Image: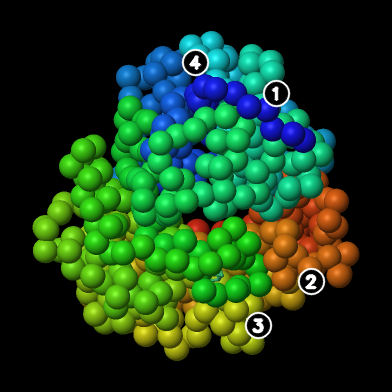
Amino acid sequence: MSIKCHTSHRLLLINPWIYDFAAFDLWMKPIGLLYLAGWLRQYGYTIDWLDCLDRYDPELLRLQGLSAPRVKAYGVGKFFRQAIPKPPILAEMPFPYSRYGISEDIFRARLHRIPRPDAVIVTSIMTYWYPAVFRVIELVKQHFPGVPVILGGIYAALCPRHATAHSHADYVLQERDPVRIIQFFDELTGFRHPRDSRSASLCEVYPAFDLYEHLDYGCLLTSLGCPYRCTYCASHLLSPQFTQREPEAVFQELLYWHRARQIQDFALYDDALLVNASTHLEPLLKQVIDADLPIRFHTPNGVHARYITERTADLMFRSGFTTLRLSLETTEPTRQQATGGKVTGAEFEQAVNALKHAGFQGKQIGVYLFVGLPGQDLREARDTIHYVHGLGLLANLCEYSPIPGTPDWNVLASQGYVEPEDDPLIHNNSVFLYLRERHNFEQIQILKNLVKAGNQRIKAQIQG
Ligand code: SF4
């Protein structure tokens, strides 16, 4: 498709709804799109912003009869939701299916108030949330006929054929390099900006959080990608190179948001936060401690237990780490090794000892573990749950679902559990194990009950 030249440079960036069985704002912001907004603005573009998941949307609050959303500890909270019909492929799932975020009426009203842009950029996250993305594109095309719509984000990167065939976007952008993305928009809009876009890099701009009127938390990326290659993970497909920012640059960004927007809670979005800790995270945390900032850190992505030394744990505790997630996945040594070798049992226990010695309580430490990995039986998942509870930690059970392009996807494809042309809706971790008859509801529910009972016991012990 050829690119037409325009002379103006107004872009509308949209973060779509979530359509799913469950969703929760656990420090969830579209950081890739916010970085893109920052870059594009830096190069002279005018940005309009529409986040369907903004819990502070004034019309959404009016619809709920609220003056402010209900905010839980550390800024997280429930999204507004409205029941919607299930796609036929999910019909047998016995859970309600919902649109999370603003209503469609509010979305349409917002479009009416936004000047006609030169292009619309729609991001995407989970592959199985694509129906919400498609609906956004449909409504945008109805409202702004003739305006090119560009689909980017994670779904577009992992499922480009599906997105190209079905989304009705004018362009499906797989590009992750900011230099090339800016060049793409320059060509699309015919805009000649005064700066040299070749200098764009991860740390050159801040994600454009100022586009939100209200913020309960901030999100930080101190690095991109991960040096590991776990067989179930798409990190290297999305960010092939592992790059880390200068600790000083991260500190300045943190300080900026803390002072400009009084942000106290920061979610660290890194995939590999603790790699090279002595030269990366530790200098940052020392600066935070020296500055005596009243902030809290949260790691919704699991961190590498093997890099948690006594010194790192102490700095994490003193700098305000409050919600910690460790990645364990399984206690089975052979599978730990075969899936990427990111941690061993001994390393994990050493990390837990260091964290507890530093002052962390078990209720602050959640441990990610899988059920349903290729080749993993239920006994293994159950043993891992018992192990985590035995260490006095909270278990976070993840129902495995395959990500296209990962080695585990290929294993499942060779066994006939997945096919390249599968509807991405089956990637949903709430449905994959059942729809592909790897486990049934009762089996998984037993594990969920085990997790719930053990977690409650640990929380009660701590409080008692
Ligand atoms: S260590 Fe974590 S982020 Fe890195 S490849 Fe493995 S699962 Fe992905």
Answer with the quarter of the image where residue 314 lies.
bottom left
| Ligand 1 quadrant in view | bottom right
Residue type at tag 2? Val
Query: Which amino acid does the dot numbered 1 rest on?
Result: Glu
Is mark 2 in CB contact (under 8 Å) with mark 4?
Answer: no
Marks 2 and 3: in contact by CB < 8 Å?
Answer: no
Cβ at disc 1 under 8 Å from ligand 1: no
Q: Which is nearer the N-term, disc 1 or disc 3?
A: 1
Whole-percent x and y of residue 176?
57, 52
Dot 1 or dot 4: first in sequence order is: 4
Q: Name the residue carrying label 4.
A: 114
- Residue with the mark numbered 2: 411
Q: Is residue 325 left or right of residue 15?
A: left
* Label 1 to label 4: alpha-carbon separation: 17 Å
Q: Helix, strand or loop at disc 3?
A: helix
CA distance for labels 2 and 4? 47 Å
Q: CA distance from mark 2 to mark 1?
A: 36 Å
Q: Mark 3 or mark 4: which is in front?
A: 4
Is the residue marked by circle 4 packed among few (<14), some (14-19), or many (20+) residues within 10 Å?
A: few
